[in-house]
Image: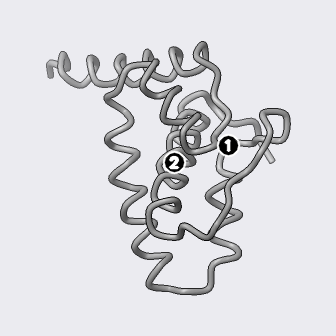
Amino acid sequence: MSTLTDNQRYHLILADIAMAAAIRTLDGAHVIAISAEAYVPACLRDAWLAQTTDPGLRKRVSAMASAGVASLQGVTAERLAAAAETYGVPLALELAEHIVEHFNAKRDAILTYDR
C-alpha cells in the first residue's frame, strides 16, 4: 500500500472521530478501544463496518459520521483533540493543530480563489 498524503490521513482521522461518535450514539454496545501505538487512520471505521451486519444501523452510523466529518473540519485544535479523546481516538494536540491548519488553509484557498 502506498503512503498516505497528509490530506488523506487528516480526512481519515476525522472520519474515525466522527464514526466513533456516531457508533457511541447509535450502537452503544460496541466498545472502541485502541492504543496510540496501534492506531492507524481508518482502522476504527473499517473494523466496525466489517463486524456490523445490520444494514440499517450501518447506514445510520455512516450518515451521522459523514455529517460529523464536515462539522469537525471547522473546530479548533483543542476541541478536535478533546473530541478525539472523548470518543477513544488517539490524537495528540500537535497533530490536531496540523489538521486544523490544513483545513483552514483549504477553506481560505477556496474563499480567495479568483478566476
Kind of residue at disc 2: Ala
Secondary structure of the residue carrying numbered label 1 = loop
Task: Give the residue drawn at x 63%, y 43%.
Answer: 88
Q: Nearer the viewer, residue 30 or 113?
A: 30
Q: Earlier in the sequence, mark 1 or mark 2?
A: 2
Badge 2 crowding class, 10 Å Cα cut-off, few under 14, some 14 to 19, many 20 or more, is: many
Residue 42 at what x, y percent from top left?
Answer: 65, 50
CB contact under 8 Å: marks 1 and 2: yes
Residue flagged by tag 1: what amino acid is it? Pro
User: Hey, which quadrant is residue 102 in on the image?
Assistant: top left
- Rendering quarter of residue 26: bottom left
Q: Say which of 114 and 64 sits in front.
A: 64
The residue that mark 2 highlights is 15
Q: Which residue is mark 1?
A: 41
- From the viewer's perspective, tell me whether residue 2 is left or right of residue 102: right
Secondary structure under the numbered disc 2 in the rendered image: helix
Q: How are the residues colored?
A: one colour
Give the residue drawn at x 68%, y 34%.
90
Residue 50 vertical placement versus 110 (above, below): below
Q: Is residue 74 above or below residue 89?
A: above
The percent position of residue 25, horizontal first and vertical second, equals: 44, 61
The relative height of residue 6 versus residue 53 in the rendered view (above or below) is above
> Residue at point 54% right, 21% down?
96
Residue 27 point in image, percent of width and height:
53, 70
Q: Position of residue 56 (x, y in %)?
A: 44, 84
